[in-house]
Image (cartoon, grey):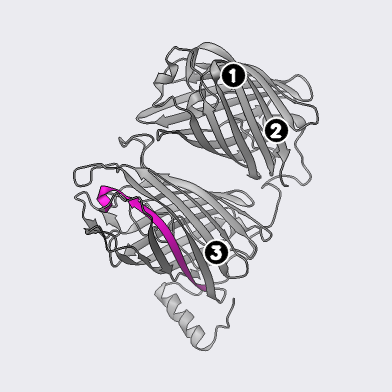
Amino acid sequence: MTRENAGPAGRVRALLAALLIVPGGTALAQDASSAIELQPSEYENFITANTMWPGVARFALGFHQTNPSIETPGTSNQVYFVDVAFSPFQGLEIGADIQTFVDPPPFPIAGTTPPIEMTGAGVHAKYRFYDDGALSVAAQVSAEWMRFASTIYGSTSTEYLFIGSAHLPLSYNITPRLQAHLTPGISVYPDSREGNPFYGTVASIGAGLSWKPTPRTLVYGTVTQPLTGANTILSDGSYARRPVLTLGGRYAVAPNTAVDLYATNGIGATPATGVLNFMPNGDIVLLGARLVHTFGPGALQKRPYGRAPGQMRTPRQRILAGDGFTLPGARTRDRGTVELNGFYGMQDAHGAFFAMAIDHNVELRMSYESIADDGSGASSKLTSAEDRWTGRFKLQFLDQMDGWPVSLAAITSLGRDLDDNGAFYVAMPVMREVTDKLALRVVPEAVFYGSNEEFGLGLGASYAVGRYTNVFGEYTVRDSGDGIWAVGAKARLGRAPFEAGLYATNAIGAFGVNAMTAQEDPRVVFSLSYIDKLFR
């Protein structure tokens, strides 16, 4: 909604602009060619006055965590979160948020390191009631249900507490690419729990800057200072107020998908918990990553960045968009493609995954795996030999078919067994199609679990022996332990939406840390995938 810059409204705008200490601005980039290229309506723990285009929906998921070198069980302290939002009409956003943190603190609090759980969900609504092209003002409220279970919270009760927040964000366009934000807010928690102090009512004032040097990139910094109540717990167990600081950047890997990388000392990822600091003392830096995807009738659909009009992948290139047997691939599948895979091998190793290319160059996957055991004790090298669930992000940054010398992707996966032992895996596969039949892969990879850090360098080759069939050979050199090898073939079953694979390997599994762990006896594995287009 736009109002004329005249009379009292104009004087209000001038006063607010003066408070932000900026000169008059011009309208921010309505020349953005997709919803992801706009200035964001929110960050992981900060709210702006911006709103999405009408008809646009947003889905975001991510995590932030402490340094893995800090001695904690699993893969350090991690906060996982998901949020969704939708703009039904101009200026209004409605959404929901989920977050979970289940870990002991990285350092003692009151002499102990008890388990801490902060898990819950909520809903929020934002309405931008003033926008004159330079200054925007909005109001947002949230209602949330959060479990705070720990002795440091004064209660180990697993009941969900009702908490809420209200914010009045202001955003001002200093230039068409630079925006300033001022966000007063209040988050409401109980003053005490079972007679012990708690956060109480936390009034706060936040400020930030966000700059878009190019349509695909964004850098931002925010600070939120609590004014009343408390937002962190000190080493002695007392409550205190400390500023929440965040510094980050965004890169659009596809016209409707971006990845945020940031550093923060905050723990919360919902509107009401965004004011809370990580404990103890609020001086621990967490590193985070968030994948943000926009879709819906208001989100413009475009071809991949840098892709020539009408250019399509060949059947051979579509096979190369998948993974190898122990090494991940450097390509994502075409936008809208889904893959449902199941495999079974000797020593009762089995598993399955579901993957979806939600956008060009962006693929999400959820997998389940039960590893092999030949009796050589290979699985004892892991912190857990239990069945493992794993979520994976795959982002492709370069594609040889677009004129680059190689195809390159980045992969991050987070896995947990049926208990609570975690594994964090990263890889950067690079592929060069030497001829229309031969492709070579180089895959630097690393995995972190418990206090372990393991590194590998994978080398792979694939050769087309027919229109729909490729043979693969893979070998991974490890910084410690035996090398990993795999040989086999994959074939598309004609024009049917199925792909079959048969291979031999000495790896105990197919994903992440399992694919980087060798056993003495080789084993044979059969896999079958259903691959089809869900949307375009």
Work out whether residue 477 can be spotted: yes
**For this rendering, which residue is in front, 203 or 385?**
385
Q: Is-magenta flag for residue 137?
A: yes
Upstream in sequence: badge 1 or badge 2:
1
Up the image or down, 348 lies above or below 169; here it is above
**Residue matched to label 2:** 530
Residue 11 lies, in percent from the top left, at 47, 85
Q: For residue 345, which numbered disc appears in the image?
A: 1
**Residue matched to label 3:** 94
Q: Please tell me whether mark 2 sits on a helix, a strand or a loop.
A: strand
Work out whether residue 266 can be spotted: no
CA gap, disc 1 to disc 2? 18 Å
- Label 3 neighbourhood size at 10 Å, few (<14), some (14-19), many (20+)? some
Upstream in sequence: badge 1 or badge 3:
3
Q: Main secondary structure of the magenta part?
A: strand
Q: Please tell me whether mark 3 sits on a helix, a strand or a loop.
A: strand
Tell me what residue is drawn at x 39 percent, y 61 percent.
162
CA gap, disc 3 to disc 2? 36 Å
Up the image or down, 10 lies above or below 221; here it is below
- Label 1 neighbourhood size at 10 Å, few (<14), some (14-19), many (20+)? some
- Identify the magenta region: 135-153
Task: Confirm or deny contact between disc 3 and disc 2 (CB under 8 A).
Answer: no
Q: Which amino acid type is marked by label 3?
A: Ile
Residue 229 lies, in percent from the top left, at 28, 65
- Label 2 neighbourhood size at 10 Å, few (<14), some (14-19), many (20+)? some
Upstream in sequence: badge 3 or badge 2:
3
Q: Which amino acid type is marked by label 2?
A: Tyr
Up the image or down, 375 lies above or below 327; here it is above
Task: Confirm or deny contact between disc 1 and disc 3 (CB under 8 A).
Answer: no
Residue 204 lies, in percent from the top left, at 34, 67
